[in-house]
Image (tube, rainbow, N blue to C red):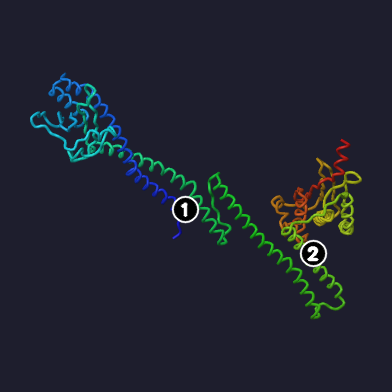
Amino acid sequence: MRKTLYLKFVIAYLIFAVFGFIVVATFMQEMTLEQLQKDKAEELYRAATMLAEEDAAALYSNNISIVSLKEEIDDMSSMLDSTIWIINPSGLIVISSAQPVNIYNPITIEGFDPTALAGSFYTVGDFHGVFSSKQLSVAAPITSGYSVKGYVIFHYDLALLQNNVNSFLNIDYLMLVILFLLSLIILIFFTEMVYLPLRKITVATEQYASGNLHYEFQVESEDEIGYLAASLSYMAKELARGEDNQKHIVANVSHDFRSPLTSIKGYLEAMQDGTIPAELYPKYVNTVLNETDRLIKLTNSLLTLNNLNTQGMILEKSDFDINEIIRQTISTFEGSCRNKKIAIELTLTGEILLVNADMSRIQQVLYNLIDNAIKFSHRNSVIKVETTERHHKIFVSVKDSGIGIPKDSINMVWDRFYKTDISRGKDKKGTGLGLSITREIIRAHAENINVISTEGVGTEFIFTLPISNHMADETEEEE
């Protein structure tokens, strides 16, 4: 059976409770008894000393009678719950609060040794076998004329002291119980704030480990446990999204490969079985070649995007004229623009506008953006390409007046293979990877690219590039 953290905590709590009672029952009892015994001995010693110095000394000076002293001793004995003796150095009990005065048949303590009392002002025991129970005995000497005439001895039954000890222990036990009950607050706090959230996290990790990445849970906490739960939930959502994207990619790749392959196979089979006559071979061979080019383009795009994501992008940065690269890229679309009667309007800042970037990668970005602009523009329309300099950054804008992007699709245009419903009919040769590659290239330069679009009006893509240090220095000198 697996021991949970909560079970361990409860066991530790119970062990702490048991040891707490053991400590109170043993060490606390002994310490309390010892302290009460010492306090009682000091109290009795003060009373014995006072009695020995005053009334008992007066007895040996014949200033007080035995009867009067006996009455006073009896009163003090009742008040202090003690047995009081006046005893001679030889062990003869002159007066005892426990017995009437008997001068004809006195009691003598056998083995009484006054020197045994010199080491401490009190002793514990049966006092030479006189008592059947343990007594706390305190002795004070009676002096007269610079000699010891006798002793005042107080005997206090330790059974009475034990009752006081038990009373104090009962208070200790009660306080201990109250302490443990209050400490249950810690257990409850641990349960609510630590164990239950950890249990939710544990169940969630088990679900994620079994493949259920869509399992949802929530921990209402702003501490480290809440942060852990939020991080775990976010990780699962990202993994789930990655898995969904992977399935989506596989489905799109399968579809995009299947369509041209089906077309190629159909034409070749038709040519083989004679359905297509020999005089039409050049036409359909050209169609097959176009489909083959489409497959090559899709494969190259997939390899490019995969390399960007797995190995990172190695940039070969240099200073180059972005205006010139724009002109060169636009020149490659001269035929496409002529076929659709599209004009490209350039608004470029300065004769030369130097940026510091990877020239071939930026040319690829421009090619993808201009190709998209031409593809989704209406006939007899204008595409505007503009460069501006602001805050030591170069802003490049490619704006068309075509079909535009629906509002709910703008944030998804960067996803791989994504095509809006209204673009599917116009983008028959597109792979859906161009904008994904474009964004990865711009991100590799630590720059930004944004899209602004209105459906039926047009679309504008704007990206930034770092200005070259040479251009930046010239700008600062002019300012």
Q: Secondary structure at mark 2?
A: helix
Q: Residues within 10 Å of mark 1 (few under 14, many from 20)?
A: few
- Disc 2 target residue: 297
Of callouts 2 and 1, the N-terminal one = 1
- Give the image location of residue 339, x and y in percent: 88, 59
- Give the image location of residue 49, x and y in percent: 25, 26
Q: Which residue is farthest top? A: 63
Using the image, tell me which numbered label, if any, was put on residue 477.
none
- Cβ–Cβ under 8 Å for marks 2 and 1: no
Task: Identify the image quadrant of the C terminus.
Answer: top right
Q: From mark 2 to mark 1, how far is it between C-alphas?
A: 57 Å
Q: Residues within 10 Å of mark 2 (few under 14, many from 20)?
A: some
Q: Which residue is farthest right? A: 351
* Towards the viewer: 441 or 145: 145
- Give the image location of residue 253, x and y in percent: 71, 65
Task: Identify the image quadrant of the N terminus.
Answer: bottom left
* Towards the viewer: 118 or 219: 118
* Towards the viewer: 53 or 268: 53
The reply, left or right, for residue 310 in relation to residue 231 is right
Using the image, tell me which numbered label, if any, was put on residue 5.
1
Q: Which residue is farthest left? A: 104
Seen at 79% across and 76% down, the residue is 268
308 lies above or below 264: above
Q: Secondary structure at mark 1?
A: helix
Q: Quadrant of residue 440?
A: bottom right
Q: Amino acid at mark 1?
A: Leu
